[in-house]
Amino acid sequence: MDAPELTLQGAYEAWADDLVRFATVLVGPSDAADVVADAFASLLRDGDRWSTIERPRPYLFGVVANQARMRHRAVGRRRRREAYVDAVTVRPPAGSPADEVAAADALRLLAGLSPQQRAVTYLAYWEDWPIDEIAGRLGVSDGTVRRQLARARAALREELS
């Protein structure tokens, strides 16, 4: 008699604590649970893959390690991008009327974009998601995401010039 097939839910129930401890070593306690959740979410999105895995526990540790690596890269890119913006931007003192005007202008510019353009802009530049992940989450093609990003950049460029 064959052993019952381990479901993704069963794997989560069996090994989530071990995976969170592992992720804590990789990314720290504040992001560990998110990394594990992202790992399982990626497996849920690609449901056919789970049934073909011969050794699920080591496989899950590898998926968590990859998610931690991707998060580390994303955080590094975000920090570099924010440092660059801070270096080239002259900011008015916080709380000053000029600061409030700058924030209002940014919101006004973003409000001028279509909802699709705002969504892809946010996910690409603030969440640092790759094009294919944005497309998958929004249920559109990669080309649509690229086109919406290009249109959003063009609209912002036009407004700023």
Image: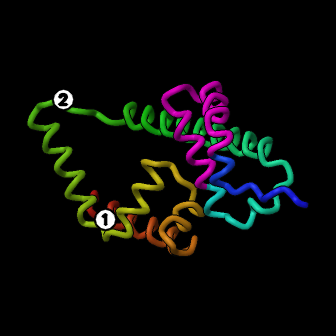
Q: Which numbered disc flags the more N-terminal residue, 1 or 2?
A: 2
Magenta-drawn stretch contains 25: yes
Marks 1 and 2 sit apart, C-alpha to C-alpha, by 27 Å
The label shown at residue 114 is none
Q: Position of residue 107 (x, y in %)?
A: 22, 53
Q: Is label 1 in a helix, a strand or a loop?
A: helix
Q: Nearer the viewer, mark 1 or mark 2?
A: 2
Which x, y percent locates residue 24? 60, 27
Amino acid of disc 1: Glu
The residue nearer to you, when weighing 143 against 21, is: 21
Of residues 96 and 36, the one nearer the viewer is 36
Residue range highlighted in magenta: 13-41
Q: Is residue 46 above or below residue 41?
A: below
Dividing the image into 4 quarters, which one contains the C terminus? bottom left
Q: Residue at x 33, y 67 (%)?
A: 155
Nearer to me, 27 or 3: 3
Main SS of residues in magenta? helix
Looking at the rendering, in which quadrant would you find the N terminus?
bottom right
User: As drawn, which residue projects farthest toward the right?
Assistant: 1
Residue 149 lies in what quarter of the image? Answer: bottom left
Q: Residue at x 68, y 39 (%)?
A: 15
Q: Residues within 10 Å of mark 1 (few under 14, many from 20)?
A: few
Residue 158, numbered label: 1
Tell me if 32 is positioned left or right of 61 in this view: left
- Tell me the number on the disc at residue 94: 2
Q: List x then y, in percent, for residue 119.
A: 39, 62
Single out the residue that lies furthest toward the left. 97
Give the amino acid at mark 2.
Ala
| Left or right of 52 on screen, residue 127 | left
Say which residue appears at 84% left-offset and 48% top-offset: 55
